Amino acid sequence: MRPTVHDIAASAGVSLATVDRVLNRRPGVRAATRAKVEAAIDRLGYVRDVAAANLAKGRVYPLVFILPDSNNSFMHGLHAEVREAIARAAAERTDIRVIEIPAFDPAALVVALDAARAERPAGVALVAIDADEVRDAVARLAEKGVPVVTLVSDLPGSRRDHYAGVDNIAAGRTAASLLGRFLGGRAGPVAVLAGSMLVRDHRERLEGFAAVLQAEFPDITILPVLEGRDEPQRAETLVAATLAAHADLLGLYSLGAGNRGLIAALKAQGGERSLTVIAHELTVHTRAALQDGIIDAVLNQDAGHEVRSAIRILKAKADGLAVVEAQERIRIDIFLRDNLP
Amino acid sequence: MRPTVHDIAASAGVSLATVDRVLNRRPGVRAATRAKVEAAIDRLGYVRDVAAANLAKGRVYPLVFILPDSNNSFMHGLHAEVREAIARAAAERTDIRVIEIPAFDPAALVVALDAARAERPAGVALVAIDADEVRDAVARLAEKGVPVVTLVSDLPGSRRDHYAGVDNIAAGRTAASLLGRFLGGRAGPVAVLAGSMLVRDHRERLEGFAAVLQAEFPDITILPVLEGRDEPQRAETLVAATLAAHADLLGLYSLGAGNRGLIAALKAQGGERSLTVIAHELTVHTRAALQDGIIDAVLNQDAGHEVRSAIRILKAKADGLAVVEAQERIRIDIFLRDNLP
DNA sequence: GAGTTTTTGATGTACGTAAATCAGAAATTC
DNA sequence: GAATTTCTGATTTACGTACATCAAAAACTC
């Protein structure tokens, strides 16, 4: 049987109350006594029974998730995953509240962060926008001791505790590597469709993409970036114009959302040209396009994993517990037509 | 606050003991009373507090993992993950015992399964070998009500409850797709290095690989399969011989383990020829080879995920709980040089 | 309607920890 | 060495559920 607090008390020759004081960092224990208790904990290999502790504490974790109201499948999926987490909330002692804000609007994000702070939650998760005013708002949360996790898009240089998302530079590099190899040495221009250069994840993907193309596939050139704001309509217009303007276009990398529009534009130009296309995020639309051969590869981040990871980390930080980094790494999924789930 | 058994009892107008009888399917409750209680449970949206329940039960889950003693990095990794799970066991009320058996030996596996059965564990996980005597041994476990999960390699047509591993046909298809596209229309032979056609996962990978090559890249032919038994030494000899015999070899698909030998053979032939190589399982060896450009892509299954998933499922089955299929799907990771973790 | 069986109620203990209270011991201060 | 402050011990209650026991009530049987 694993040791309990009673065993620690007996082994250390102190009372249960003292063990409790040591375990929960309550004051009123001399250094010498504390050392005795800690020695006993080590000796017996005591691990606190988290289930029993939570039961006794009756602790709940009020969490706030701040999400953009973007109208694209990925964000819809993210919202859905948060809703699923809310449904499971009862069983996990979490109480998740969602604040929706306009996309790509740093001011709105700051307002939401400050509003969240007023609720004194056990933790806050946000899809970050890369702006100093946002960093300041995160700092205000940190000041109050509220753990903060960035979701999908990171905010380096801020006081956030963790980033639950993929390595976007690696994603961009991977896209370039696949695109380059699929093109097999051909020379010509490729287009890049992004959402906005305001969000860090898009900028980083572009950075990684450009770096690998330049280093390993110098014959492939990159056209000026199209900013679709993750809106299908806008994306369609931009892509259609590019297709018309560049008869020699070899391929396209869609590093943001709004792929519905991209796919519509590609379909509209018919099967005349065979473009090599790499896109992000597996949705009903990209999945169908993969199967139809319109898209060649999809890089995906699993929104469900990201949400669950963010929750685990916020709870752990709130309790001052360590995080198992390896388990929380969010991987880049690569989907071809042949390994669709 | 979420409702407790007390609330149910009050709301249904019965005693706590009766609620307990209904919840835990104990006898001695009239159908009408049972209905009343169940109505109250629905009405209040009661969910059992699993933490409290486990605490009260003091339940532990003795699990048995049967693993081959193969001397390759993937199996070493799998063993390591199981050991990590054992280290976490205390906190999760599991008590995991490992039985090691010789690789590719159905008779030894049957002996181990029967030995496991004698211990009356809460569940058994095994790396399956595709043989009817193994199916029979699994059936004997099922007969006793012991949940069984296959790990890494499946055993279809058996009474196993779940398979914690990747879709190997999809893995083979993906390998073919990548290889074909990386070769960009060239014609010639490719080699396949497998461990053994005795294990299902290797057979299925080959099947998927051959199917896609034939359908989409008819100019690429497949040489007779090399069986390396997942042993580095043997793999090296086989690959070296094939390289010597086929000057026009375009590429190689290593669908099993023992890639140390493969890499040694590839290095030995120097940089004269540029083969396109796809391998399985990310280990220190394949990682280094990816970085050196010796291997072009690695398909990986995350052993840690598989082990943790197997444990979750065995516990859930032991308690008669439902499994969240979507969460337990093991994905095929594709690693290029650019997205190495 | 007496006897039997089945169903229900009331109550208590246990799981391992948290948290509070109060009394007593030890250390510190002057 | 008395007064004060700081530690420590002993004990109790609580969290939500599981499980056991015994008594009481209700439902059957003949």
Image (cartoon, coloured by chain):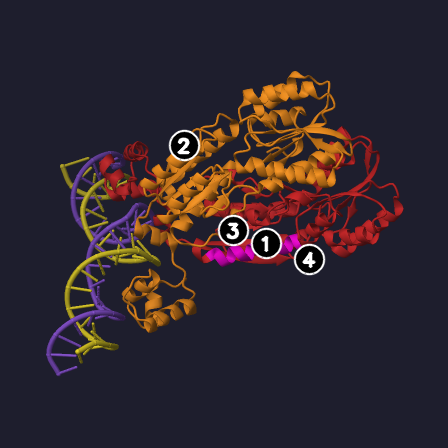
Chain colours: A red, B orange, C purple, D yellow
Name the mark nearer the viewer: 1 or 2.
Answer: 2
- C-beta proximity under 8 Å, tags 2 and 3: no
SS at badge 3: helix
Between marks 3 and 1 in the image, the one whose residue lies nearer the viewer: 3
Q: Chain of mark 3?
A: B
Q: Which residues are magenta?
A: A72-89
Secondary structure under badge 2? helix
Prevailing secondary structure class for the magenta stretch in the rendered image = helix
Task: Residue A52: give its label.
Answer: none
**To which residue does mark 1 refer?**
A66
Camera-near label (4 vs 2) is 2
Return the residue at label 2. Answer: B108
Please say whether residue A114 is visible from this viewpoint.
Answer: no
Q: Is residue A167 above or below residue B273?
A: below
Q: Chain of mark 1?
A: A
Residue B261, horizontal then vertical, whole percent: 58, 21
Residue A339 sits inside the magenta stretch = no
- Give the residue pinned by disc 3: B325
Q: Mark 3 is on which residue type?
A: Glu
Q: Nearer the viewer, residue B323 or A159?
A: B323
Image position of A262 (left or right of B50)? right
State left or right for residue A318 relative to residue A271: left
Q: Earlier in the sequence, mark 2 or mark 3?
A: 2
Residue marked by disc 4: A71
